[in-house]
Image (cartoon, helix red, strand yellow):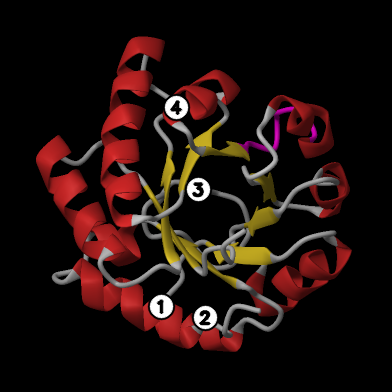
Amino acid sequence: MPPLPRVLVITDWRLPREQLLTALARALDAGPDVAVQHRHPEAPAPLFLEEARLLAQLCHARGRALFVNGRLDVALEVGAHLHLPASGPAPHVVRPALPPERWVSAAVHDAAEARHAHGADLALVSPVFSPGSKPNDTRPPLGPEGFAALARLLPCPALALGGMTPERARAVRGAAGVAVISAVLAAADPTLAARALGDACPPST
């Protein structure tokens, strides 16, 4: 198995499609530690699958990992890993349906969800700081200490999500990496932005 990603770029389909795909391609050029998560909760099923296929082509051509948010059937269809939202089933429940080489990641916002993440390979813990892509998010940020407390409860490595920058990534102890949206997709140079975030994270083990 390759190492888990240290920089996970989550899609924002509010952007024009070509702009988004170009930014993701440039981010993936930063290196093998960069992966993509397909998230589009408003999309009808046919559109979600169409987008997943585009992302799979983008990622697989570069040997990079793709996670599909919440849809086991789509993840199996496009050869992707699976990300489970906090409202989804526990990772250990869905794992038997996945090939052994596929990862399962889980969303975690509190201690109960950390316990629910049993069986995950990776957790996305948020919001560590106020998320730049969700200005209306009213959840109080966890901060570095809150992140560290949840990370200690997890059975797997944790990525810090929410308002992450390279400076903040260096301040968050116990993070295996970061998950971001606007920090990369809105950057003037997504390659450099993804690389800077990866360089700020601890090395893969």
The C terminus is located in which quarter? Answer: bottom right
Instruction: Residue type at mark 1: give it.
Output: Leu
For residue 169, which numbered disc appears in the image? 2
Discs 4, 1 touching: Cβ within 8 Å:
no
Which residue appears at 26% of the width and 45% of the height?
58
Residues at circles 3 and 4 in contact by the CB criterion of under 8 Å: no
Residue 173 vertical placement versus 60 (above, below): below
Picture coordinates of residue 25, whole percent (x, y): 22, 55
Q: Which mark is residue 137?
A: 3
Tell me whether circle 1 and circle 2 mark residues in contact (CB < 8 Å): yes
| Residue at point 44%, 27% (across, down) | 41
Residue mark closest to the camera, 3 vs 2 = 2
Which residue sits at x=42%, y=57%? 35
Residue 26, position in %: x, y? 20, 62
Q: Is residue 146 above or below residue 90?
A: below
Disc on the earlier residue, 1 or 2: 2
**Distance between the alpha carbons at the discs numbered 4 and 1:** 26 Å
Does the stretch in magenta take in 89? Answer: yes
